[in-house]
Structures are given as C-alpha cells and as structure tokens.
Image (tube, helix red, strand yellow):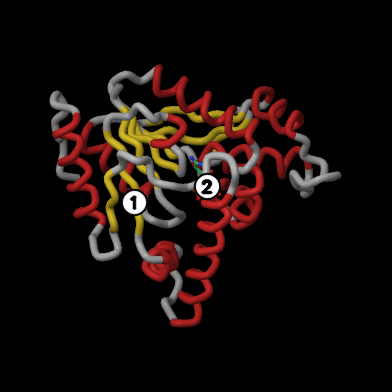
Amino acid sequence: MRVIAIDGPAASGKSSTGARVAQQLGWAHLDSGALYRALTLASLDSLGKGGTGKGEGWSVQRVLALADGLPVRLVLVGGAFRAEVAGVDVEEAIRSERVTRHVSALAAIPELRAWANAQQRQLVAEHPAGVVVDGRDIGTVVFPEAPLKVFLTATPDERARRRLTQQGQVLDTERVRRESQALAARDEADASRPVAPLQPAVDAVLLDSTHLTLDEQVARIVALAQERFPTVHRLTGA
Ligand code: DC
C-alpha cells in the first residue's frame, strides 16, 4: 500500500512537511485534521454554537447526518485534498479560531472518528498512486499497515514560535509563552483521550524537528520513502 503516515502534535509541521513530501514524490497529500475541522465548521454553522456535551444540541446522530447530507468531504485539487462543505471549498474557514476552539471535543467522539477514518480509507483506495496522510492516529489506527510511519515532534516553544511566525505575529517572550502553553494543553487533550490518543506507532520513525529546517525534515522523509518504496522516485527539488 502506498501510504506514508505522518503523525505528531499540533503545529509540529506535519501538514507543510506532508504537502512537500507528496509534491516531491508525485503523490497526493491528505491532511486528516481538515476532516475534523470541516465537520466542526458545518456543525457550528448548521447546529448553532452548542457543543457535544450532555444536553447540548450537537448529538452525534445530527452531526453524522450533516456529514453525509451536506456533505462534508475532501476533494482532490491539484495534488492536495481540500475540505468542502455542501460543495463549497472551506479550506480557509476551517482554520479559524472559532473552529480551532471546538474541534478537539468533536474529534474525541468515537462515531465521528469512525466516519473520518472511513473517508480517509476510501480516498486512499481511490488513489493507488500514493498518498501522504497526516494527523494524530494515522499510523496507529487509520493505516496501521502503512509501510512508512513518521512521528514528527518539536518542543512546545519551538512549535509556538513557528505558529506565531506563520500568523505574521511578533515573537515576544510573553506571546510565545502563552502560545506554547495553549499548544501543550491541546497536546494533553489529544494524548489523554480514550479513543485514538496521540501517540507514536511502535514502528514509527521518530523525527524531532526542533533543530531542523522544513527542507531538512522533508529530505529525511523522502529518503526514507525511497528506501521503503523501492519504485518511488523524487520528482522535484521544490
Ligand atoms: O491538525 P489539526 O490542528 O488541523 O487538527 C484538528 C483537530 O483534529 C485536533 O484537535 C486534533 C484532531 N485530529 C485528530 O484527532 N485526529 C487526526 N487524525 C487529525 C486531527
């Protein structure tokens, strides 16, 4: 099976790394977090503010009915899967603070994870040329048989600096500290949930990117891919 699984905590660079690796190999890139985010956006827009807690409006059945009815899905556009809700591209909207605040709660629900896993498996089956999939549980749950699994990490401070830089913010000590704490809290929520917690697969290659540039991370994974998939060639240096 031509799948490379890249897992790791928030802001560890999984998606930018996954996108570049896919581009260099001529494979597609699937950011599984986009599925959870698109489902969250659809629920916020269609079911109101609520939440998935007891007595709140987002019953699992209602969210699943939205997922299938609207539908919420990923569509391959020029080598990358993009999130769509009711036929509208929502790649930008799903990165909003509003979605980020609610997504962890929704991603902790087993039935919604089963839905997301089924989507990913179907998309991969439809793209035998190869897919780089990134997320939290790709190597452990979604594609445990992937020939190459990478667990990408970096210290919370370094991840905070990268995220703030990406957002065009100034890197003052206080801001980095606050962002670093927020990331650590999200890691904790993702790692301690009972279903599909964030953890490396036993056979994952651990890659600490704290002191690596994006190009270096990508080059390491592409080199591993060439070892694990003998017929794979690097297409571009881009
Ligand atoms: O990587 P991200 O920030 O876009 O992920 C959004 C949320 O979805 C985050 O709370 C973790 C969750 N997620 C998950 O539980 N499993 C995945 N395979 C991908 C994301």
Amino acid type assigned to the residue bearing label 2 in the image: Glu
In front: 127, or 53? 53
Q: In the drawing, what numbered circle is on residue 92?
A: 2
Q: Which residue is mark 1?
A: 152
Position above or below: 214 against 156: above
Q: Dividing the picture into quarters, in which one does residue 222 lie?
A: top left
Position above or below: 22 against 16: above
In front: 195, or 133? 195
In front: 184, or 178? 184
Left/right of residue 85 with respect to residue 187 in the rendered view: right
Could you say whether the residue bearing mark 2 is in a helix, strand or loop? loop
Image position, residue 223 (x, y; %): 15, 41
Image position, residue 188 (x, y; %): 54, 58
Q: Dividing the picture into quarters, in which one does residue 236 lie?
A: top left
Neighbours of disc 2 within 10 Å: few (<14), some (14-19), many (20+): few
Left/right of residue 204 with respect to residue 188 in the rendered view: left
Position above or below: 125 against 228: above
